């Protein structure tokens, strides 16, 4: 997975050439990652469409949370081009509108629930999917009150899966958010301890 270049704010042509050079020089499949909230640069659907013609570029993790963006991309790529959500908040509508899955933060804390949501959405079981999606929204919110992965590492430590530790420049999860996370984990059906 290769992210859109950050810091220097490339043009769409710069983004296109960046991914093209990488894909042309690898013998592995490339998944592009568009996350303008972190990189500042936003790969537009037309650029995704151009890049989808490269045989080594197999898909995109689209983390804008904009379902209209998914629709625009789908019109420009072949049906075998993989479309993954990178936004847990809009996972259900993303799959409902033709996305293939998710590369998730919430799935680190509630893997069974997120996997089930993907399955239900894919199978068109919308009523059950909506109910499950609603039960995960508080967890999605709690996992983004501070920079990822600070909250997810704290939540996983509360599940007993790792020690409570994080490396600089990230800092410990602020205690003011602990009760919100515990409540959200309980609501999502996550076993704590």
Image: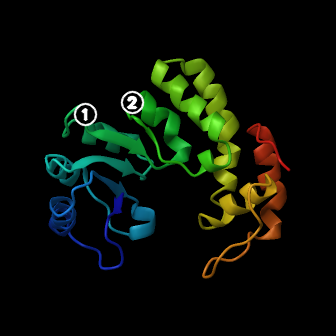
Asked if residue 79 lies left or right of residue 131, the reply is: left
Using the image, determine if residue 95 lies above or below residue 41: above
Label 1 sits on a secondary structure element that is loop
Residue closest to the eye, 20 or 29 = 29
Relative image position of residue 131 (x, y in whole percent): 66, 26
- Gap between marks 2 and 1, in whole Å? 15 Å
Relative image position of residue 133 (x, y in whole percent): 62, 34
Name the outermost residue toward the bottom. 169
Q: Residues within 10 Å of mark 2 (few under 14, many from 20)?
A: some
Relative image position of residue 167 (x, y in whole percent): 64, 77
Asked if residue 78 lies left or right of residue 145, the reply is: left
Q: Which mark is residue 97?
A: 2
Question: Residue at (67%, 42%) from the top-left corner?
Answer: 110
**First reached walking from the N terminus: tag 2 or tag 1:** 1
Quarter residue 168 falls in? bottom right
Q: How many marks?
A: 2
Q: Which residue is mark 1?
A: 80
Asked if residue 55 lies left or right of residue 128, the reply is: left
């Amino acid at each position: 997975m290769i992210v859109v270049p950050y810091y220097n704010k490339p043009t769409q042509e710069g983004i296109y050439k960046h991914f093209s050079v990488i894909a042309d020089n690898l013998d592995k499949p490339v998944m592009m990652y568009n996350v303008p909230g972190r990189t500042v640069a936003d790969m537009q659907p037309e650029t995704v469409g151009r890049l989808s013609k490269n045989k080594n570029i197999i898909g995109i993790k689209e983390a804008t949370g904009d379902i209209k963006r998914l629709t625009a991309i789908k019109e420009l790529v072949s049906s075998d081009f993989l479309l993954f959500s990178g936004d847990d908040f809009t996972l259900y509508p993303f799959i409902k509108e033709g996305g293939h899955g998710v590369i998730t933060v919430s799935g680190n804390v509630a893997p069974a629930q997120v996997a089930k949501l993907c399955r239900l959405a894919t199978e068109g079981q919308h009523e059950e999917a909506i109910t499950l999606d609603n039960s995960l929204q508080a967890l999605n919110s709690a996992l983004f009150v501070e920079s990822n992965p600070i909250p997810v590492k704290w939540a996983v430590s509360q599940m007993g899966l790792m020690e409570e530790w994080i490396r600089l420049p990230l800092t410990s999860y602020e205690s003011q958010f602990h009760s919100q996370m515990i409540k959200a984990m309980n609501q999502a059906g996550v076993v704590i301890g």
